[in-house]
Amino acid sequence: MESYNLHKKIGSKKGVMYSTTALASLSSSRGDYNKAIKLYEDVIETNKKLDNDKSLYYSMYMNIGTNYKKLGNLKDAKKYYLMGLEVASGLNNAHNLLSSYKKLSDFYEETKDYENALKYYKLAKSKVKEMNVEQARNKELQFSYQRKAVADSVAYEKEKKIKEIEIAKHQIELTVKRNQQYGLYGGLVLVLVFAGVMYNRFKISQKQKNIIEEKEQETNLQKQIIEEKHKEITDSIQYAKRIQSAILPSKKLVDKYLPDSFILYKPKDIVAGDFYWMEAASVILFAAADCTGHGVPGAMVSVVCNNGLNRSVREYGLTDPGKILDKTREIVIAEFEKSEEQVQDGMDIALCSLEGNKLQYAGANNPLWIIRKGSTEVEEIKANKQPIGKFDNPEPYTTHNITLEKGDTIYIFSDGYVDQFGGDKNKKFKAANFKKLLLTIQNETIEKQKELIDQAFEEWKGSLEQIDDVCVIGVRI
């Protein structure tokens, strides 16, 4: 507001416009979506009177659409998303087009218009492929241009020298005709000059060859540097994987405290945002967690969240799942608040405490599923609808107490499995299909269940890319 008032005071309309954009973003993050929409519309009107920046229209339309969507006004949300797509298409901005396709795909999926959801998902996928191809083509064109430039330079020098030789030869012929009386001496001069020209041409050819070889060496050196940098990055990520693997419970520890269990862990990239956790205190604590993002960023968040769980149990002596999640949220927020940047990252988690046949569970967005021995239904214990991280109006996490019987099986998991696209129609796997799968394999051993769950995932995914990290834990009592 201080920035807005100062720009208004000095008459800077552009400054007022930028400050208004920031205020709109803040209003949206605080949940005042109507105010955010009004401010974004003010920015659009100001832009019309100033530079009429088309790319700014795109950003404003997409922001307004998102706020209408959060208000539940799907009609206006769709309208502004399509207006944003129209602007991006007019500008032929690949990144904006990709963003529009993704938002529209998510929008149509949430409104159950699966045909359009698939349409824009395919457009987004095609645009990513097109951008990758374009990037490769640009590098190829750059390399071809460099080689052509060298070749053109060589050709120009050759043509120039040939013309010089022709002029010299013509002058020699005139000299011979004008001085035929010198006879042998004139012929000797001609031979000597011609020999000199041929030697000069030889030197020029050698020089041209050296130039081409130098350019090729320079290109090969650049390629080698790029390959070395790529190897350095890959080696660093591989080392990060070793570090992340070190914080995961060992198979020996899992087998000791949960002997009849499985953990299906399938990172999307080398390192992951998903992780599983275990701590043996007075009770057995175990969890499946899904941190914001995947790959390197997700892995970095997972280290912070894993540390929060460890401190809650080891430092504060907590064993109640709800209280552990409360303390972990407090620790994670405190860690991220040390940064000057506003960090909204955190995690979803299902956390269990097991002592004999007594189970306690608490969850942040991720539920607990129970299949009683001989049952044909999945009993679902719902999680609190709030993440471990910054959240408006947070509440204490609820601890659920459940009594289990021998032969009952419990499952906790991240959303990577049920959100995977695949099948004949390239749709998400969905929770309902996952429940059906678990019910059909209840008579199998726990290890066989892991094998069948993994097999079903791979068959569903087919040739499509894995879209997120996957973590599924099953425990039979």
Image (spheres, rainbow, N blue to C red):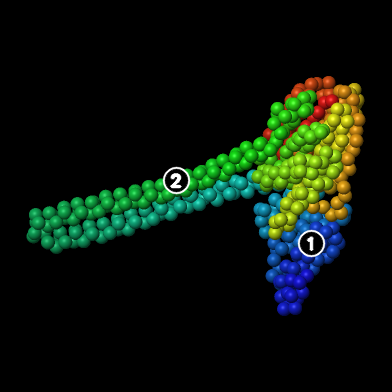
In x, y percent, where is residue 193? 18, 55
Q: Secondary structure at mark 1?
A: helix
Choose between 207 and 231: the one closer to the eye. Answer: 231
Kind of residue indicated by mark 1: Leu
Residue 31 lies in quadrant: bottom right
Q: Nearer the viewer, residue 343 or 178?
A: 343
Q: For mark 2, what is the residue?
A: 220
Q: Is residue 243 visible?
A: yes
Vertical relation: 433 (above or below) 112: above
The crowding category of the residue bearing disc 1, from other C-alpha atoms within 10 Å (few below 14, some 14 to 19, many at least 20), is some
Which one is in front, 139 or 476?
A: 476
Q: Which callout, 2 or 1, points at the residue further toward the start of the chain?
A: 1
Callout 2–callout 1 Cβ contact below 8 Å: no
The image quadrant of residue 41 is: bottom right
User: Which quadrant would the N terminus be assigned to in this image?
Assistant: bottom right
Which quarter shows the C terminus?
top right
Residue 395 x/y as whole percent? 88, 49
Position of residue 379 measured from the top left corner of the image (x, y, whole percent): 90, 32
The residue shown at (66%, 36%) is: 245
Residue 26 marker:
1
Residue 307 position by quadrant? top right
Q: Is residue 435 visible?
A: no
